[in-house]
Amino acid sequence: MTESVLQPESLAPPAELQRAPMSPAGRSFGWLNDKLTAFNEGRTPLWWWVLFLPAAFCAMALLPAMLIYKISTGVGVWGNNMPVMWGWDIINFVWWVGVAHAGTLISALLFLTRQHWRTAIGRAAEAMTVFAVAMAGLYPAIHVGRSWFDWYMFPVPTSNGLWPQFRSPLMWDVFAVNTYLIVSTLFWYMGLIPDLAVMRDRSRSRVGKFCYGLFALGWTGSAHQWHNFEKAYVVLSGLATLLVFTVSSIVGMDFATAQLAGWHETIFPFYFVAGAVFCGFGMVLVLLIPLRKWCRLEDIITLAHIDKICKMTLLMGCVMGYIYAVEFFIAWYSGSPYDAWVFGHRMFGHAYWYGGWAMIIVNASMPQLFWFKKVRQNLVLVFIMAVLINIGMWFERFTIIVGSLYQDFLPANWGVYYPTWVDLGVYLGTLGAFFMLYLLFVRFVPMVPVSEVKGAMPQANPHFGNGKGGRA
Amino acid sequence: MSKQTYGLVAEFDSPGTVLQAAEKARDAGYRRWDVFSPFPIHGMDKVMGMGNSYVGWFAFIFGAGAFIGTMGLIWFCNDYDYPILIGGKPMFSAPMSFVPSYILLVLGAAVGAFVGMIALNQLPRHHHPLFGSKRFGLASRDKFFLAIGANDPKFSEMEVRKFLEDIGGAHIELVEDND
């Protein structure tokens, strides 16, 4: 054996296969501090106002107006009618829950599996979760006809002695979505505490010092505090990871327990989790690709991050393709004429064939482009694909819900469903509220976790520089 | 308002130097001291002799309580107080009660972990004596601080100041407790 075979250089991958660095190597902690808080401390840029004002209009004017009109008049203002009693309200509920899931997967599951690249995008993804779950939670509350009886869903002792019916997955949903909102808010806020202390210590105005100081809770960064903080962070990550798999499973069971062809499938819990994560990765890309440029965070949220999210999206796209194939196969293999009818009409029905094709083409086929590095590095293309994924996943929920309901077992019941302007208004309102909250988040707190990124730097290892090396 | 001495605080430049300083403070026999850093330093918990954090127990107790409580609630609502027969299903069974109980276990444990972290860290507090120090704001930026408290049995200003100088601390400052 010649010596040259064992030379380490000969084992290094060729230049085109080497990975881009995930952390801004060679930068100091102080540089990171200034860089990551610069956007919060600088002047509000024009693009922020251009996006914020329409979003705030949708959230603060359109959404309340639509809600007042719907609640005071009744569900009839929506397009829901026999036989399609679940329309845009439930489609959007499932869609928003789905958007939330990738945030938790990135911030919690990737933390537990020690994927250090997630540090830079964890906070942004978790914020997406919190705001998306809040939007999701709104829909079931207004979908019930008489919203002033929403409190019936909670076990409150009343004079009529009735209790919630815990045999129904719809009831489980009440607990699952509320739990998801509270846990992801706690997780997000707890991660923010050290960074709010950073903002407090940097702030020069009295108002800033007071507000950041108030929410930083008097954090000093002592070793004892970090000790408990790290433990709590691990525990919360583990718990949030459980929620990635439970919340959408329960949403899936809402459908699977119904005796309806197109819904009555054992694959639904898994199907909904996979779809949720897939859709959420699309939303992460939609948010991060412009923000990393506009907030000047290209050194922190690098092309390598986008590349990794694209690969995760590709994986989930393949899972979606597999699930669609299983669904169609079972519809044929079960021999049930009702199943065959529903699935045949998904693709070739006269009313909603476009929804079925949208899910196959956009969700299962288009992500296959992510196999190519050239595609993953083309940010404009990735952004367009991410927007299309969100639309495709919306159509998937439309196909599942409306596509299964509009032709049920009795042909005399059949009918078609069209949304009304109130459906559209509520959806635009929640989109506006989501983006408004997200823009406020980006403006006022560090979008990238300052202390976590510092801790992931090579020189954060106490043994850095004395031969033992640091973690990259 | 009485003025008391909180302790002496010294500044270090890197996680490695403050970790070595902490080892020396431990070996010198100081008891009431703490290290302040912009991020958790690996190995510091061992040097400071901190065992496993009790946050896990908070999470466990809150979570277990929530699970058992929800099981009991479902039994009370659907089996004991107002039983309604639906589809011939049992009044109380694992499939109907496990999922909500499990969900609330997650909620209880998460609230427990958060409450535990806040309580064990003695937060929230509106002020800390160290916030009176001019340079301490850098503890959230890129500096590392080691503070030896005046309530340490071995504390004497002269000796501690000399000790902190010897272990390489810069900008040694006497911090007063104005509370």
Image (cartoon, rainbow, N blue to C red):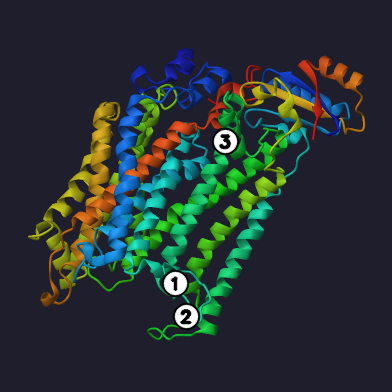
Percent position of residue A361, x then y: 18, 46
Q: Residues within 10 Å of mark 3 (few under 14, many from 20)?
A: some
Q: Residues within 10 Å of mark 1 (few under 14, many from 20)?
A: some
Earlier in the chain: of badge 1 and badge 3, it is 1
The kind of secondary structure element at disc 3 is: helix
Q: Which quarter of the rendered picture does the C terminus of chain B lie within?
A: top right
**Residue at image location 28% in from the left, 28% down from the top:** A379
Q: In the image, which disc is placed on residue A152?
A: 1
**Residue at image location 49% in from the left, 67% down from the top:** B100
Q: Chain of mark 3?
A: A
**Residue at image location 25% in from the left, 28% down from the top:** A380
Mark 2 → mark 1, Cα distance in angstroms: 9 Å
Percent position of residue B120, x then y: 71, 46
Badge 2 vs badge 1, beta-carbon distance below 8 Å: yes
Quick one: A57 or A289, which is closer to the camera?
A57
Q: Which residue is mark 2?
A: A162
